[in-house]
Amino acid sequence: MRRVSTEIAAIVREPATVRNLEGMGFETVGGTPEEAGRFLEAEIARWAAVIRAANVQVE
């Protein structure tokens, strides 16, 4: 898994890739798989709170 992460990080740092991703509204950042996991956990908690506060229901 570490090698896949390293290869993807190298691709995401390429200027053409950065331009394409940013053109689609993405923000490119680097990090380890562990950092990505922590980011996703924080985002899940954040948006779960928003959904609960807005009383969003699945139809």
Image (spheres, helix red, strand yellow):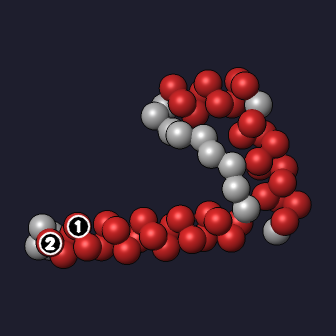
The residue wearing badge 2 is 53
- On the question of residue 42 being in view, the answer is yes
Tell me the kind of residue under disc 1: Val
- Which mark is drawn over residue 50? 1
In the picture, which quadrant includes the C terminus? bottom left
Considering depth in this image, is 48 or 42 the residue closer to the camera? 42
Q: Residue at x 72, y 25 (%)?
A: 15
In the picture, which quadrant includes the N terminus? bottom right
Tell me the kind of residue under disc 2: Ala
SS for tag 1? helix
Give the image location of residue 34, x and y in percent: 68, 70
Left or right: 31 in relation to 10: left
Q: Residue furthest right?
A: 3
Give the image location of residue 55, x and y in percent: 11, 73
Does the CB distance between marks 1 and 2 fall below 8 Å?
yes
- Which mark is drawn over residue 18? none
Give the image location of residue 38, x and y in percent: 57, 71
Left or right: 42 in relation to 47: right
